[in-house]
Image (spheres, rainbow, N blue to C red):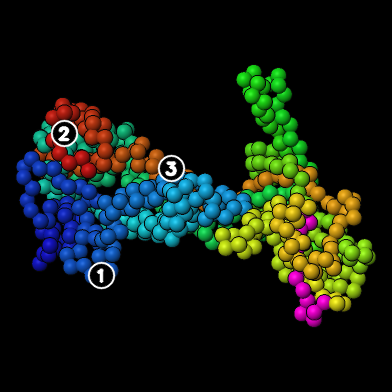
């Protein structure tokens, strides 16, 4: 819709799309009927999204400035977020092949759930795009409305056009019997008692209170924008980490993307006695943990931190007894107890390289499961590590694969070099656990090389086992203070908008003739009663219901 002239009869030049003159409030496009109530949304000021001939930039602006679009985006995001709760997300797993887990655990639906990427919903590109679009909508919606509203409220004049006053929802017209200035003094005093700020100008009066409440929705938007930006910032490396891992007793484990190591010094578990459990549970032979505690030490790596083979130089920074809901906390890192495993796990061993036929021992070396060295010198022979599996298994093609990062079935493939062997070396597969040697047929795989060489642990004194494994969730969330700040700002905005109302009363005298109009963004009942009481204080008796014309409540 285009207009040739946007200049008001009062002389003020308005922008295209202005509904009510920014200066005097006169309707710009059509004369309202005698019973019509003026549209006071944003005080009738033009907005950028109302351009008659929008460019492509304006079209993008118009799209994101639409409240309907914002609601649709929020609904789509909520639906997408709910889909991510159907099955556990991949981030909750410690050491599982997600493709296998979903199909085996949840069947065909789980398989499709994984294939469609719903197993990592909250890190997916489409979910992040929706959050960005909601953020853009909040920013543009706010700018499209707050700037015109600020301009209208900041520049509002006391004396308004008669059509503006009589077009309000709460209206009173009549004659006064007193001297105009004295009567205005009474009205000023009556409104001031009710918390209004008074401005007078040549027989006209503007009473206003709680203007700040109009900024509540926009403060709410700012809080939501801060909240969304903080959520998106979690994808920045180092801003957010949630690491689920098992910590074998006595072995420091690295916390990824940090300079810290965490060690399970000792784990204890206490069970409910039969006297403390219901009789039914006792009959069923059920056992429940009453308390489990990890005595933990947090270290900072100070040297050899990036060497995958060398032992890092660690400095102790914190000790704490971790219990459920009592985490170890240090430098923004929190370690929470969530499970345990009392199955002994292999940590290290000292095998001998020997000739099984003659019993000749060539030498002994220490083999650590986690920090395995690249090369071992054993007598005249050299063992070069080519592959390592923490939990050896075979995939669907019959090829070796690592089933998890827990040392449940460790396996090592060495390239042996030395006297009587080829210059390129010969591969040797070694399973430290006896059960795995038989299960995966180590001797058959090694063939003739296995007849000449054997890795064997002389006694249990040469084996180091972890008595227990404590499962901890290690979190670091740099964005969390900003998330809480955004939520607090948003809540303040909601309180401002819900518990206070912006109320304005315009009145002007032409001789003894009074014209009064009043507007609020909500709670018309309260406004009309305040106006009626103020008029009564100035000796003008009116029925509050009679001055409320009904109509648009915006």
Tell me, yes or no, whether the two marked residues, 1 and 3, touch with CB atoms within 8 Å: no
Q: Give residue 318's position: percent from left, percent from top.
A: 76, 49
* 353 sits to left or right of 243: right
Magenta residues, as a range?
A: 421-433
Q: Is residue 424 shown in magenta?
A: yes
Please identify the quadrant where the N terminus is shown. Answer: bottom left
| Mark sitting earlier along the chain (3/2) | 3
Q: Is residue 116 shown in magenta?
A: no
Residue, x 15% and y 39% (percent of image)?
Answer: 551
Q: Give residue 236's position: percent from left, percent from top.
A: 54, 61
Task: Judge whether 205 appears above or below 542 on screen.
Answer: below
Q: Which residue is mark 2?
A: 548
| Chief SS of the magenta region | loop
Residue, x 83% and y 56% (percent of image)?
Answer: 349
Q: Nearer the viewer, mark 1 or mark 2?
A: 1
Q: How far is disc 1 from disc 3 in space, using C-alphas?
A: 35 Å
Q: Which residue is mark 1?
A: 56
Residue, x 26% and y 35% (percent of image)?
Answer: 523
Q: Quadrant of residue 197?
A: top left
Farthest residue toward the bottom? 423
């Amino acid at each position: 819709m285009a207009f040739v002239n946007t200049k008001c009869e009062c002389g003020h030049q308005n922008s295209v799309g202005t509904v009510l003159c920014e200066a005097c409030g006169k309707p710009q496009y059509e004369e309202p009927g005698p019973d019509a109530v003026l549209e006071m949304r944003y005080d009738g000021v033009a907005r950028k999204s109302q351009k008659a001939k929008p460019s492509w930039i304006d079209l993008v602006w118009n799209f994101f400035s639409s409240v309907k679009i914002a609601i649709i985006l929020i609904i789509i995001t909520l639906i997408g977020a709910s889909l991510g709760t159907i099955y556990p997300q991949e981030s909750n797993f410690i050491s599982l092949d997600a493709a296998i887990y979903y199909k085996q655990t949840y069947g065909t639906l789980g398989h499709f759930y994984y294939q469609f990427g719903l197993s990592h919903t909250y890190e997916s590109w489409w979910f992040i795009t929706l959050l960005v679009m909601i953020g853009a909508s909040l920013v543009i919606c706010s700018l499209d409305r707050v700037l015109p509203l600020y301009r209208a409220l900041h520049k509002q004049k006391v004396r308004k056009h008669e059509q503006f006053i009589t077009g309000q929802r709460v209206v009173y017209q009549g004659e006064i019997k007193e001297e105009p200035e004295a009567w205005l003094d009474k009205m000023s005093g009556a409104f001031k008692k009710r918390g209004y700020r008074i401005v007078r100008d040549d027989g006209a009066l503007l009473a206003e209170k709680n203007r700040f409440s109009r900024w509540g929705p926009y403060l709410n938007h700012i809080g939501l924008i801060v909240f969304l930006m903080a959520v998106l910032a979690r994808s920045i490396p180092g801003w957010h980490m949630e690491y689920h891992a098992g910590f074998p007793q006595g072995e420091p484990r690295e916390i990824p993307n940090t300079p810290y190591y965490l060690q399970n010094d000792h784990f204890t578990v206490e069970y409910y006695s039969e006297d403390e459990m219901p009789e039914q549970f006792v009959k069923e032979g059920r056992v429940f943990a009453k308390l489990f505690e990890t005595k933990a030490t947090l270290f900072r790596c100070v040297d050899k931190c990036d060497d995958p083979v060398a032992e890092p130089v660690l400095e102790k920074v914190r000790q704490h007894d971790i219990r459920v809901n009592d985490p170890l906390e240090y430098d923004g890192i929190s370690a929470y107890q969530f499970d345990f495993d009392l199955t002994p796990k292999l940590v290290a061993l000292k095998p001998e390289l020997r000739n099984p036929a003659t019993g000749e021992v060539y030498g002994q070396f220490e083999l650590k499961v986690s920090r395995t060295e690249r090369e071992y010198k054993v007598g005249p022979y050299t063992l070069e590590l080519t592959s390592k599996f923490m939990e050896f298994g075979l995939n669907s093609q019959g090829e070796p694969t690592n089933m998890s990062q827990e040392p449940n079935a460790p396996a090592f493939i060495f390239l042996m070099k030395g006297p009587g062997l080829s210059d390129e070396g010969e591969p040797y597969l070694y399973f430290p656990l006896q059960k795995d040697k038989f299960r995966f047929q180590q001797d058959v795989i090694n063939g003739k090389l296995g007849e000449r060489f054997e890795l064997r642990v002389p006694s249990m004194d040469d084996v180091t086992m972890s008595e227990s494994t404590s499962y901890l969730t290690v979190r670091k969330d740099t964005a969390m203070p900003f998330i809480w700040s955004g939520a607090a700002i948003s809540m303040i905005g909601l309180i401002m908008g819900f518990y206070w109302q912006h109320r304005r009363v315009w009145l002007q005298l032409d001789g003894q003739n009074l014209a009064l109009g009043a507007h609020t963004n909500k709670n018309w009942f309260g406004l009309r009663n305040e106006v009626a009481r103020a008029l009564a204080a100035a000796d003008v008796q009116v029925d509050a219901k009679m001055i409320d014309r009904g109509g648009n409540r915006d």
